[in-house]
Amino acid sequence: MRVALISATKLSLQPIENAIRNNKDSIEFFHLLDTSLITMLKNDQHLSDRIVRRFKSLCDISMENGVDCIQLTCSAFNDVTEQLKEIYPIPVFRSDEGMVEKALSYKRIGIVSTFAETPEVLKNYILKKAPDAEIYIEVNTDIMSAFEKGNKDLHDECVVKMIQSLQDKVDVVVLAQYSIAHVAKQQTFNVPIITAPDATIELIMGQNLGV
């Protein structure tokens, strides 16, 4: 299988690569990284026409390289897939698609996020699929900069505290960003923790996309 990974931050690259390499089946992949997308989103405050056009350009490049599917890795842009799926003849997956499918087995769902735009996007996606779900959110947008500056310990400590603040209120916690997935394995929590990279690979491999 050949997969194009479209990312808006370099922090997404290593987590999805790790999940791919931990998978028993062979996946050939390549990255399309466009860090200007985050600036565009902050300036436009929504998925503007120019952002959609940028994603179409990235998908066109993906198609030229003969991929079996296109996988987004950045949570804030997930809603753009609704338009992309109507254009391209191959699957275009949200970064949270596999994670949400697993989370829907639970009633009370906690969301931990480090990006301001993500929680509302993810909450709406969950409620569209499960209107009766109860959503609890913890978001801290300051700790991403700590990670980017190399202060991983501070970043991870903050994510752990966010999980702990939710775990007595919910049945499951989803970690919205690929960049925080590694924290789930650092200690034992009171509820299941679902991470996007691992769930993404499970989803891709379950589609029988020419493997």
Image: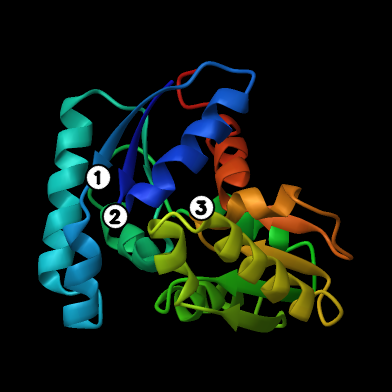
- Local crowd size for mark 2, using a 10 Å CA cut-off: few (<14), some (14–19), many (≥20): many
**Residue 135 screen position, x and y as percent:** 67, 82
Which mark is first along the chain, 3 or 2? 2
Image quarter (top left, top right, bottom left or bottom right) of the N terminus: top left
- Local crowd size for mark 1, using a 10 Å CA cut-off: few (<14), some (14–19), many (≥20): some
> Where does label 2 land, which residue?
8
Q: Secondary structure at mark 2?
A: loop
**205 above or below 185?**
above
Which mark is first along the chain, 1 or 3? 1
Instruction: Tell me the residue at 81%/58% (across/down).
Output: 192
Residue 207 visible in the shown view:
no
Q: Secondary structure at mark 1?
A: strand
In depth, the one of 73 and 190 nearer the eye is: 190
Q: What is the CA distance from the residue labelled 3 to the residue labelled 1?
A: 14 Å
Is 24 positioned to the left or the right of 14 in the image?
A: right
Q: In the rendered structure, which amino acid carries the disc numbered 3?
A: Tyr
In depth, the one of 14 and 200 nearer the eye is: 14
Instruction: Tell me the residue at 21%/32% (across/down).
Output: 63
> Where does label 1 land, which residue?
33
Q: What is the CA distance from the residue labelled 2 to the residue labelled 3?
A: 11 Å
> Where does label 3 land, which residue?
178
Instruction: Tell me the residue at 46%/53% (across/down).
Output: 95
- Whether the residues at callouts 3 and 1 have beta carbons within 8 Å, the answer is no
Instruction: Tell me the residue at 75%/50% (across/down).
Output: 186
Q: In the rendered structure, which amino acid carries the disc numbered 1?
A: Leu
- Whether the residues at callouts 1 and 2 have beta carbons within 8 Å, the answer is yes
In depth, the one of 88 and 74 nearer the eye is: 74
In depth, the one of 18 and 62 nearer the eye is: 18
Q: Secondary structure at mark 3?
A: helix
**Residue 60 screen position, x and y as percent:** 15, 40
Which mark is first along the chain, 2 or 1? 2
